[in-house]
């Protein structure tokens, strides 16, 4: 008997996904316009109504969806969260606290328009619900994350050829992690040449603008930030930056701070950070960035840009796809060099700070644990880590990661997070082997370090799965002090006459970008049920 589909057959699953994707594209590009005209006609019913009737109808539809969403979220949180996992409500308190604080310190609190705030958070909630609380949604993103990891492993073929098959993993970070950026950058450049990236970004931007009521420029930039970096995404709206309002500039900067580039995300995946949560964090941060940006710096003027001009994104200027691939690889050189030298500099600075602080700590009898930068950050950011919903035992560790990300950069923070992830894998293997052998296990702690019976020391100890997921979302953004200079330099070069306005909004935007990441982490913490 011929078996047409077996869900356990990976090849069949991939073919199904590919067929669905091609089918959707064909329907969208070939049939949708014709079908919509045939079914609804050239003129919509609203064009036959008076302006007053149209406005009342729009308001009725809008409030129907708002009230429906509020009721659904409240009922779901009470039934599925409060009654089953009440500790998750700390994350809900975090959402409320961040919104209240941002409203109080908003540039113009009285002029805040809550449509982008409400629908930005609603989109986050629905997306997190899909990934974290539906079996098929979680499995789909888990499958997608696994395929991305598998795809990135093809980088090893190039690394082995250039650096040697036997020796390239001896310098793991330089020759295995960073080289992924070259491969991914080349692929992105090829997709730009083919127009695929523009198609995806343009339609995500239209969806965001429709739901949140944001302008075409800030919506397109937010959509682009899902895939490309804070200095590359504004290139898509470069002709319009000169005429943008301060609120729009603030939203553009916030979008850059609240997300990471796809090429950098590829490196984090190679470091062991959960790929499914990295992918979802990148998508969820786009509406979160617009929501927080419009709450912290409300729009008070009318945008001068037109949708048809903004969404007409051109293809790459390369002559063929080979040139596009080569240019993409070449562009990655600067990014890889920047990451490498910044890591060397910042880790060295961190080591110096720790040594200096420890020395001063010894002078005032602070010895166990020693006074370090991480220890200070763990106390400063403790309230934030607690509000995110981190496991109580892990709050200090998550707070330290947030401090490292904010004052140094997210790459250093994810490097530290990857240590916890590797420790958890080592510990689980150790416990599994001990259970299989029916051996009694004894472990001991020295400060945060966990010492196993086999004399293995897990430096820093462990993070729970819940705290790891929350930290993955909270760290997923370029919102750190050094990125302020990058943002000013990039936007200032594109619009020199707006440099004053850019410097005026950029610090608030960095804070908003950080909080957008925290909001994403809060919603993930609210809906986390322990099965991820």
Image (spheres, rainbow, N blue to C red):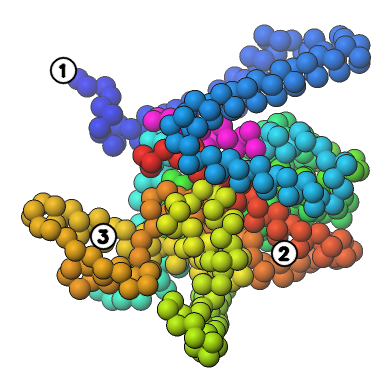
**Classed neighbour count for the residue bearing mark 3: other residues with Cα under 10 Å, few (<14), some (14–19), many (≥20):** some
Which residues, given as a range, are shown in magenta? 121-136
**Would you say 194 lies left or right of 454 here?**
right
Task: Out of 259 and 355, give the one closest to the viewer.
Answer: 355
Q: Which mark is residue 427?
A: 3
| Quadrant hosting residue 217 | top right
Q: CA distance from mark 1 to mark 3?
A: 46 Å
Q: Which mark is residue 1?
A: 1
| Quadrant hosting residue 504 | bottom right
Residue most toward the left?
437
Residue located 48% across and 41% down the image = 87
Task: Out of 175 and 118, give the one closest to the viewer.
Answer: 118
Tell me the SS state at disc 2. helix
Task: Out of 375 and 531, give the one closest to the viewer.
Answer: 375
Mark positioned earlier in the residue sequence (3 or 2): 3
Q: Which mark is residue 54?
A: none
The residue that mark 2 highlights is: 487
- Residues at marks 1 and 3 touching, judged by CB atoms closer than 8 Å: no
């Amino acid at each position: 008997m011929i078996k047409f589909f077996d869900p356990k057959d990976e090849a069949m699953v991939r073919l199904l996904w590919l067929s669905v994707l091609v089918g959707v594209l064909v329907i969208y590009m070939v049939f949708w316009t014709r079908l919509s005209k045939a079914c609804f006609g050239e003129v919509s019913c609203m064009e036959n109504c008076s302006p007053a009737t149209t406005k009342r109808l729009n308001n009725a539809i809008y409030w129907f969806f708002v009230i429906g969403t509020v009721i659904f979220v409240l009922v779901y949180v009470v039934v599925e969260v409060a009654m089953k996992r009440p500790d998750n409500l700390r994350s809900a308190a975090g959402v409320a606290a961040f919104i209240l604080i941002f409203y109080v310190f908003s540039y113009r609190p009285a002029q805040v328009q809550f449509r982008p705030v409400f629908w930005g958070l609603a989109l986050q909630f629905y997306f997190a619900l899909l990934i974290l609380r539906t079996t098929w949604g979680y499995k789909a993103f888990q499958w997608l994350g696994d395929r991305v990891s598998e795809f990135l492993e093809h980088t090893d073929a190039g690394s082995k050829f250039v650096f040697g098959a036997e020796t390239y993993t001896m310098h793991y970070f330089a020759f295995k992690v960073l080289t992924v950026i070259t491969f991914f950058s080349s692929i992105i450049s090829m997709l730009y040449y083919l127009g695929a990236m523009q198609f995806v970004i343009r339609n995500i931007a239209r969806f965001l603008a429709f739901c949140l009521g944001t302008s075409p420029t800030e919506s397109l930039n937010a959509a682009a930030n899902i895939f490309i970096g804070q200095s590359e995404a504004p290139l898509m709206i470069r002709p319009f930056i000169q005429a943008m309002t301060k609120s729009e500039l603030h939203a553009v900067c916030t979008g850059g701070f609240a997300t990471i580039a796809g090429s950098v995300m590829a490196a984090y995946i190679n470091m062991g950070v959960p790929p499914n949560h990295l992918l979802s964090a990148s998508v969820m941060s786009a509406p979160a960035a617009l929501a927080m940006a419009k709450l912290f710096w409300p729009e008070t003027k009318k945008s001068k840009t037109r949708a048809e001009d903004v969404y007409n994104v051109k293809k790459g200027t390369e002559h063929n796809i080979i040139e596009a691939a080569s240019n993409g690889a070449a562009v990655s050189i600067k990014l890889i060099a920047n990451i490498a030298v910044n890591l060397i500099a910042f880790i060295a600075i961190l080591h110096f700070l720790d040594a200096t602080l420890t020395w001063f700590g010894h002078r005032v009898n602070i010895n166990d644990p020693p006074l370090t930068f991480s220890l200070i950050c763990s106390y400063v950011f403790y309230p934030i880590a607690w509000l995110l919903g981190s496991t109580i035992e892990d709050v200090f560790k998550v707070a330290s990661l947030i401090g490292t990300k904010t004052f140094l950069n997210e790459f250093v923070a994810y490097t530290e997070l990857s240590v916890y992830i590797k420790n958890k894998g080592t510990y689980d293997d150790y416990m599994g082997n001990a259970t299989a052998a029916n051996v009694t296990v004894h472990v001991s702690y020295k400060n945060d370090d966990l010492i196993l019976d086999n004399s293995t020391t897990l430096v820093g100890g462990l993070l729970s799965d819940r705290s790891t997921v929350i930290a993955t979302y909270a760290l997923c953004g370029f919102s750190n002090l050094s990125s302020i200079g990058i943002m000013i330099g990039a936007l200032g070069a594109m619009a020199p006459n707006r440099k004053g306005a850019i410097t005026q909004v950029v610090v608030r935007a960095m804070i908003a970008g950080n909080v957008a990441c925290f909001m994403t982490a809060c919603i993930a913490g609210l809906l986390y049920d322990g099965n991820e």
